[in-house]
C-alpha cells in the first residue's frame, strides 16, 4: 500500500510541475493530471471485476505503471507524459480499493482497524514520496526525480507478485 500510494502521489504532486517547467508546456500540464484522475476512476470501477486475483491485478498493474511512467519520462514530451498518466491511472488506479478489500477479507471481524491501518500506511507513502522526489530534484534535477516514480511502482508490483505467490501456496492470507 505504501509504495502504490507513493507512486500515485508522486505523479499527482510532480506531473504539473514537470510538464509546465521542464517541458515548458503550461497548457498540457493540467490536462495530464486530469487524464490521470479519469483513468484512475475507470480503473477503480473495472479492475475489481477482472477475473484475476486482487494481488495479481496489483502486481501486473504496478509493474505496468512503472514501465509506462518510465517510457513517458524518457519520451521527454508533454504528450508522452499525458499518455503515461493515462497508463498509470488505468493500471495503478485500483491499488487502494483492492488493497482495502484484501485487508477487509484478511480480518473480517475487525475491518475498521485493518482498513484504518492500511490508510495510515497509504498516507505515509503519500507524505514521504513527494519529499524524497524533492530531495532527488535538488541534487539531480526534476527529470531524474520524476523518473524515480517508475521504480517505486515496479517495487510495489514485485511485492504484490511475491505476496500473490505466497497466497497461492497458502503461506500467507
Image (cartoon, helix red, strand yellow):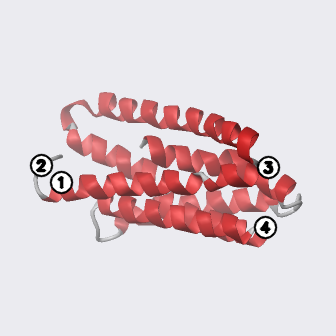
The residue shown at (89%, 60%) is: 24
10 Å crowding of disc 2: few (<14), some (14-19), many (20+): few
**In this picture, residue 107 sits left or right of residue 134:** left
Distance between the Cα atoms at labels 1 and 3? 40 Å
Residue 7: percent from left, percent from top: 55, 49
Residue 42: percent from left, percent from top: 53, 64
The residue shown at (42%, 52%) is: 156
Residue 131: percent from left, percent from top: 64, 34
10 Å crowding of disc 1: few (<14), some (14-19), many (20+): few
Q: Could you say which disc has been placed on residue 17 in the image?
A: 3
Q: Secondary structure at mark 1?
A: helix
State which tag comes first along the sequence, 4 or 2: 4
Q: Could you say which disc has been placed on residue 167 in the image?
A: 1
The residue shown at (29%, 41%) is: 103
In the foreground, 21 or 110 = 21
Badge 1 vs badge 2, beta-carbon distance below 8 Å: yes
10 Å crowding of disc 3: few (<14), some (14-19), many (20+): some
10 Å crowding of disc 4: few (<14), some (14-19), many (20+): many
**Which quarter of the image is occupied by the N terminus?**
top left
Q: Secondary structure at mark 4?
A: helix
Quickly name the residue at label 2.
Answer: 171
The residue sitting at the front extreme is 139
Quickly name the residue at label 4.
Answer: 78
State which tag comes first along the sequence, 1 or 3: 3
Distance between the Cα atoms at labels 4 and 2? 44 Å
Q: Quadrant of residue 56?
A: bottom left
Distance between the Cα atoms at labels 4 and 1? 40 Å
Badge 1 vs badge 3, beta-carbon distance below 8 Å: no
Amino acid at each position: 500500500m505504501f509504495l502504490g500510494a507513493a507512486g500515485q502521489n508522486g505523479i499527482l504532486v510532480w506531473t504539473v510541475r514537470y510538464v509546465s517547467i521542464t517541458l515548458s508546456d503550461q497548457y498540457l500540464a493540467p490536462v495530464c493530471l486530469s487524464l490521470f484522475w479519469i483513468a484512475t476512476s475507470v480503473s477503480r470501477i473495472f479492475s475489481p471485476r477482472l477475473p484475476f486475483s486482487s494481488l495479481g491485478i496489483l502486481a501486473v498493474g504496478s509493474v505496468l505503471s512503472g514501465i509506462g511512467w518510465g517510457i513517458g519520462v524518457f519520451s521527454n514530451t508533454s504528450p508522452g507524459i499525458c499518455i503515461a498518466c493515462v497508463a498509470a491511472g488505468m493500471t495503478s488506479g485500483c491499488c487502494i480499493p483492492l488493497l482495502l478489500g484484501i485487508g477487509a477479507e484478511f480480518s473480517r471481524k475487525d475491518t475498521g482497524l485493518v482498513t484504518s491501518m492500511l490508510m495510515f500506511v497509504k498516507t505515509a507513502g503519500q507524505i514521504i514520496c513527494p519529499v524524497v522526489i524533492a530531495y532527488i530534484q535538488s541534487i539531480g534535477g526534476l527529470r531524474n526525480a520524476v523518473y524515480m516514480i517508475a521504480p517505486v511502482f515496479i517495487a510495489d508490483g514485485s511485492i504484490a507478485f511475491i505476496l500473490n505467490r505466497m497466497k497461492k501456496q497458502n503461506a500467507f492470507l
